Structure formats: structure tokens, C-alpha cells
Image: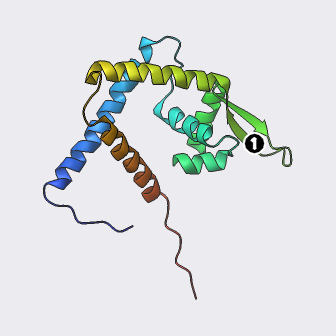
């Protein structure tokens, strides 16, 4: 990974961005109680569920890699997601020791409710048409993608 040197004004702004993101995410999660039909999920459960929803049929090992979790942490989150009815484990038809992970209809319904709740909460906080919203979504999407790319280990250099 190549790192570009920061300017004196950029470094504090990036650190501030991290604090703002973490604080906003925590506050947003506090609003789940406003809709009793929303099944509450931890940040880890949301991350795992998102991996399963983005890649139905994925394996636990692949989900752990995608989520950046150790297998034991993924197993705990999966156990809870299965208990909450959000994820279904299906045995592999070829190798019965292996399982694939699939989101349930309850997970889709919960996500729909969460999106509606988050829309309402953010609209109340920011107003009808906040300036810079589309640019912020693009920036944060790029940030998430790059953080994920930087988390993955670099491919080893070929040896001669």
C-alpha cells in the first residue's frame, strides 16, 4: 500500500472524519428502538448479514474474510443471526460438513424497516434535501471500498 504524505491541514480533518463517522453510526443505532418491529442487530451482526446478503450462498470462511472477522467471532455472530431468523445455514449437497449461508425473508423485511427508519431519522436531522448529500454518499462509499481494499493482505510478490 502506497501512502501519500498528508498536508498539515488534511491530517486533523481525516481524524475528525473518523470520530464523526463513529459517533454518527452509534447515534443512528440508538434509534432502532423507535420501531419495535426492527430486530436489533449489533454492528458485527449487521456486517455479517450484509456480507451474506451481498453474496447469498457464501461459506462461513468467505464471510469471515469479507467481514474482516476471526472465525470464532463470525461463528458467534452467525449463531445469533440464525437464532434471530436472519440467516439460514444450508448443508452443501456435495460436502455435508460444509454449509452455505443465505439471508432469510425476515432479513429482507428487517432491512426494509431499517432503511425506512434511517431515512426518517436522517431526514429529521438534516432536512428534506440536505446540500452535498449525493457527494457525501459517493465519498463515504469510496472510503468504505478503499478501507476494505487496504485491509486485505497484498498479494505476495512472485518469486523467480
Residue 84 sits above or below residue 71 on the image? above
Image point 32% across, 21% down: which residue?
123
Image point 31% across, 40% down: which residue?
136
Q: Is residue 115 left or right of residue 86?
A: left
Q: Quadrant of the C terminus?
A: bottom right
Label 1 element class: strand
Q: Is residue 102 left or right of residue 146?
A: right
> x, y (%) of residue 141?
40, 45
The crowd level at tag 1 (other Cα within 10 Å; few <14, some 14-19, many 20+) is some
Q: In the rendered image, which quarter is residue 158 located in?
A: bottom right
Q: Is residue 139 left or right of residue 74?
A: left
Q: How many marks?
A: 1
Q: Which of the two residues, 20 or 55, is positioned nearer the viewer here?
A: 55
Q: Which residue is mark 1?
A: 99
> x, y (%) of residue 55?
63, 43
Image point 19% across, 54% down: which residue?
11
Residue 127 sits above or below residue 145 on the image? above
Image point 49% across, 59% down: which residue?
152
Q: Which of the two residues, 57 or 85, is positioned nearer the viewer here?
A: 57
> x, y (%) of residue 46?
51, 33
Q: In the rendered image, which quarter is residue 84 located in?
A: top right
Q: Quadrant of the N terminus?
A: bottom left
Task: Give the residue furthest to the left.
Answer: 8
Q: Is residue 84 among what the camera can see?
A: no
Amino acid at each position: 500500500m502506497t501512502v501519500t504524505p498528508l498536508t498539515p491541514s488534511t491530517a486533523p480533518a481525516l481524524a475528525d472524519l473518523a470520530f464523526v463517522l463513529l459517533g454518527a453510526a452509534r447515534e443512528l443505532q440508538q434509534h432502532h428502538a423507535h420501531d419495535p418491529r426492527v430486530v436489533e442487530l449489533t454492528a458485527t451482526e449487521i456486517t455479517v448479514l450484509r456480507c451474506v446478503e451481498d453474496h447469498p450462498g457464501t461459506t462461513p470462511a468467505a464471510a469471515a474474510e469479507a467481514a474482516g472477522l476471526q472465525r470464532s467471532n463470525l461463528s458467534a455472530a452467525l449463531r445469533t443471526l440464525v437464532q434471530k431468523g436472519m440467516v439460514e445455514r444450508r448443508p452443501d449437497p456435495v460436502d455435508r460438513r460444509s454449509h452455505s449461508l443465505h439471508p432469510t425473508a425476515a432479513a429482507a423485511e428487517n432491512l426494509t424497516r431499517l432503511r425506512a427508519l434511517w431515512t426518517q431519522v436522517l431526514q429529521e436531522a438534516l432536512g428534506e434535501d440536505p446540500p452535498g448529500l449525493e457527494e457525501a454518499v459517493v465519498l463515504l462509499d469510496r472510503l468504505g471500498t478503499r478501507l476494505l481494499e487496504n485491509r486485505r493482505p497484498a498479494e505476495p510478490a512472485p518469486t523467480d
